[in-house]
Image: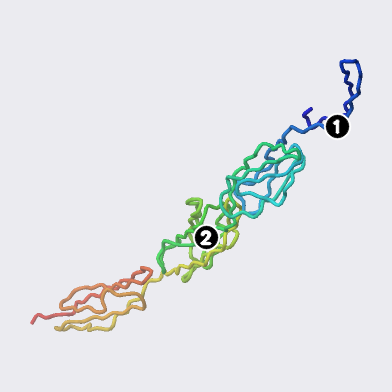
Amino acid sequence: MTTRDTPPLNYISSIKDLAGNVASVAGPITPTDGVAPVISETTAVASAINDNTPNYTFTASETGTILYGGDCTSGIATATSGPNTLAFNALPDGPHNNCTIAVTDAAGNASNQVVISSFTVDTVAPAVTVSSTATNPTRVSPIPFAATFSEPVTGFESGDISVANGTVGSFAAASSTVYTFVVAPSGEGGVTVSVGAAKANDSAGNGNTAAANFTRTFDSIAPVITITSYTLTQTNQDITVSASANEGTLNAAAHLFTANDSFSFVATDAALNAATTTVTITNIDKVA
């Protein structure tokens, strides 16, 4: 009798010797358990999770001692018949693909070994930075921007972008980590873009950290060129014309006219706005 389902029995019999004498034999028989437990995975850990003590559920056909293998261990040492939910002890961030579990019953029968489905613990929040291909300052409108995440995310939308002195325009996902958009300035001056915390999530459910504010100065106003006074009456002398600008750089601070001619002063600011003022001299007469 080798089944755990067999109840204890009392055995009664007799023995007869060669002379015909009969002796009775009686005693208890204790059955042994030769059937191993059977276990199976019931609820696996999510493939990516931001909890380093994730829950795991398996089902056992009978009570026994739990045997853990690989990275995964737990404070729960005994399985009961039916579903068993346990929390793994703290795991480091990263993939866990070598975990196993088995159960040994009271008779020492070992169950099948279940290979726990692979999963990755990720408790690190994605970081995001804002950038622009436009120079600073810029006269470009709308101004191009990009939000770049440190890992793939989902759920990021144009409404998650905050702007001071501007309005978000076209928005597109260039990839799972880079999102491009443009901002139309509301006026001259700084256009500041920011992305708050928890606007997008990685595959483990971690929300992003907030991005540092990023500013581009919008400047669409060209410099103003001022020409100093010069001789306008007929003369047989050279005429020097000087110029200045309220910002930026001039192609020339002065120009010497030795004969009647034209010259254009050009001022360009840091945003590449340009202004041109042309001076034409017609009053030089050096002919006797």
Q: Is residue 237 left or right of residue 142?
A: left
Residue 41: quarter of image: top right
Mark 2, secondary structure of its residue: strand
Mark 1, secondary structure of its residue: loop
What residue do we see at 52% from left, 62% from top?
167
| Alpha carbons under labels 1 and 2: distance apart | 70 Å
What amino acid type should be assigned to the residue bearing mark 1? Pro
Q: Which residue sits furthest top?
A: 19
Residue 253 image point, x, y percent: 26, 79
Which of the two residues, 247 or 57, is positioned nearer the viewer here?
Answer: 57
Residue 84 image point, x, y percent: 73, 44
Vertical placement of 136 versus 198: above or below?
Answer: below
Q: Is residue 229 left or right of residue 219?
A: left
What residue do we see at 27% from left, 73% from top?
251
Instruction: List the residue tagged with mark 1.
Output: 8
Vertical placement of 154 versus 194: above or below?
Answer: above
Residue 174 image point, x, y percent: 47, 51
